[in-house]
Image (cartoon, helix red, strand yellow):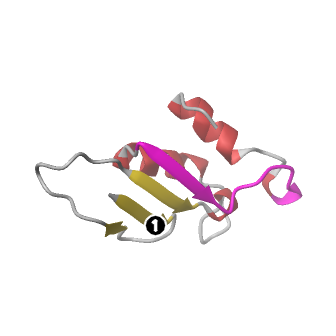
């Protein structure tokens, strides 16, 4: 099952079947918009809670980078990895 969503979307889009007798691998493909919401406020914890809510096996992040002045040189990938206890 693949869950594709934008951090500011209301309803995620599920791709693939979700039958009862099937093994499931949940992949979250997330456009994090550089860690900001629509009001240009940093939303690292909103992204973290979203990931926890869907509990994916694999997380694919888009629009995430380091060393940008606009986000204070913070690393969203490292933040999420440390908070979730995962590898980045």
**Residue bearing mark 1:** 5
Compared to residue 12, the image places residue 79 above or below, namely above
Can you tell which quarter of the image residue 71 is in?
A: bottom right
Residue at 84% over, 47% down: 73
Q: Is residue 61 left or right of residue 1?
A: right
In the rendered image, the residue lying farthest to the left is 20
Magenta-tinted stretch? 57-70
Residue located at (35% from left, 70% from top): 11
User: Callout 1: helix, strand or loop?
Assistant: strand
| Percent position of residue 25, x then y | 34, 47
Question: Image quadrant of residue 36?
Answer: bottom right
**The C terminus lies in quadrant:** top right
The answer to whether residue 3 is magenta is: no
Give residue 63's position: percent from left, percent from top.
68, 63
54 displayed left or right of 30: left
| Residue extending farthest front | 22
Q: Residue at x 18, y 50 (%)?
A: 22
For the residue pair 59 and 45, the one nearer the viewer reads as: 59
Q: Closer to the camera, 58 or 37?
A: 58
Q: Is residue 69 magenta?
A: yes
Q: Nearer the viewer, residue 83 or 21?
A: 21
Above or below: residue 9 compared with residue 35: below
């Amino acid at each position: 099952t693949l869950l594709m969503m934008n951090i500011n979307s209301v309803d995620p889009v599920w791709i693939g079947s979700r039958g009862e007798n099937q093994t499931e691998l949940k992949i979250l493909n997330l456009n994090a918009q550089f860690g900001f919401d629509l009001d240009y406020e940093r939303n690292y914890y909103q992204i973290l809670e979203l990931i926890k809510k869907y509990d994916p096996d694999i997380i694919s992040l888009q629009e995430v980078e380091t060393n940008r002045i606009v986000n204070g040189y913070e690393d969203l990938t490292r933040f999420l990895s440390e908070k979730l206890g995962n590898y980045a």
